[in-house]
Image: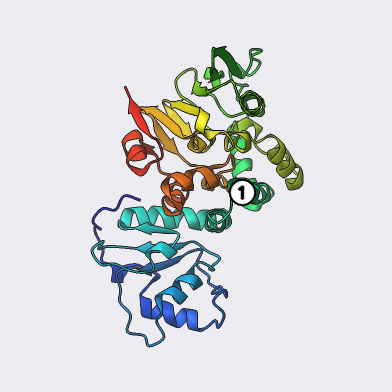
Amino acid sequence: MDHQPARNMPSEQLEGLLGLDQLVDLSLQFHAESAAAPTQSPYLLIDLNSESAHPAYESQQLGDWLQHQAVPVIGYLRNEETPNALIAKVDLVVNRIGELNRLTTNIAKNPISSMILVQVLRNTEQLDVQQALTLESLAYSTLQSGAEFASWLKGFRESQSGIKDPVGSSNSSPAVLLSRQQDVLTIQLNRPETRNAFSMEMRDGLFEAFQMLAMDNSINKATVSGLGACFCTGGDLLEFGRFTNPADAHRVRTLSLPSRLLAEHVSRVEFRLHGACIGSGIEIPAFANRVIAQRKTFFQLPEIAMGLIPGAGGCVSIPRRIGRQRTAYLALSGKRINASTALEWGLIDAIVD
């Protein structure tokens, strides 16, 4: 993430913050590098500015031990000028108290999805794209049968009780429009009345569009955009919870996830984004070699608050653009970032007016 000077309370007042000597003592209680420390806390918070005088301190060994922890490992860095060999080993780095409080609160509310997120991110960066997508799908499908998602879904359905179906739910036009001029294929998300919520119908339409791209080498370029006020607000919430069997959910995602096809033909695809790009609205575009966005575009990964993780390919595409730590920060904080920040991080490639 973009580091800023720390504010407010000093590090020694942060509850649960471990200095390096304390961390070494904790790791020594478990002899194998792969042994995870049992902890009542849903996260491990370490002071990256602390120094160690412990005779057993060895940064590589301690770093390897950190990456085997079950829970998210958060590094608190109040002073960037103090280098620390463990920075690359933590799941994310925070340097503001307000940001830290937001993250730890979110993790405490949904500890299982938070734990699975960082475990997936640690492992997918070592895999090729297709293997990584399989791991993400397995994790996402598992969480769909979990208590955290069930709790969110119950609350969401209660909030929708008595609300009529949204205008356009019976729209008979295709959810994805295709047109071709010479060697350029134009792909448009066509559900502006639902802010292009990523429904099963839209998923299938986009999958077919990428199939066409895969089968026709005469298409030199495909552009993907969305009609209406925004590109895509993520998964259609009204369809959430339809798969009660996680194995069936994984099977469908394996066979029809647009990201699987897109990942094999990224050099020919350009995404043109505007407005809200939430969840799958940025997870899928992030695979492409070129992503441009209008200046007022914003990006967000809200899945952890639902007891889930990014499941449209975001645990694979986004880290390959902005790194594992910034991806974890976006997902665990649920924070929106604007186009300028997205460009600075590398999430998009250009801003257009």
Circle 1 residue: 136
279 over 331 or under it: above or below: above
Dot 1 falls on a residue whose secondary structure is helix
Residue lying farthest bottom?
A: 55
Q: Residue at x 32, y 84 (%)?
A: 53
Q: Residue at x 40, y 75 (%)?
A: 59
The percent coordinates of residue 103 (x first, y second) are: 42, 54
Type of the residue with mark 1:
Glu
The way the protein has been coloured in the rendering is rainbow
Q: Which of 58 and 165 is in front in this view?
A: 58
18 over 100 or under it: above or below: below
Along the horizontal axis of the image, is 126 left or right of 21?
A: right
Along the horizontal axis of the image, is 237 left or right of 45?
A: right
Counting the numbered discs, the total is 1
Q: Nearer the viewer, residue 12 or 87?
A: 87
The percent coordinates of residue 177 (x first, y second) are: 59, 16
260 over 330 or under it: above or below: above
Q: Which of 345 and 303 is in front in this view?
A: 345
Q: Nearer the viewer, residue 82 or 169?
A: 82
- Does residue 230 appear in this view? yes
Q: How crowded is mark 1: few (under 14 residues within 10 Å), some or many (20 or more)?
A: many
Q: Which residue is drawn at 39% across and 52% down?
A: 102
Along the horizontal axis of the image, is 261 left or right of 53?
A: right
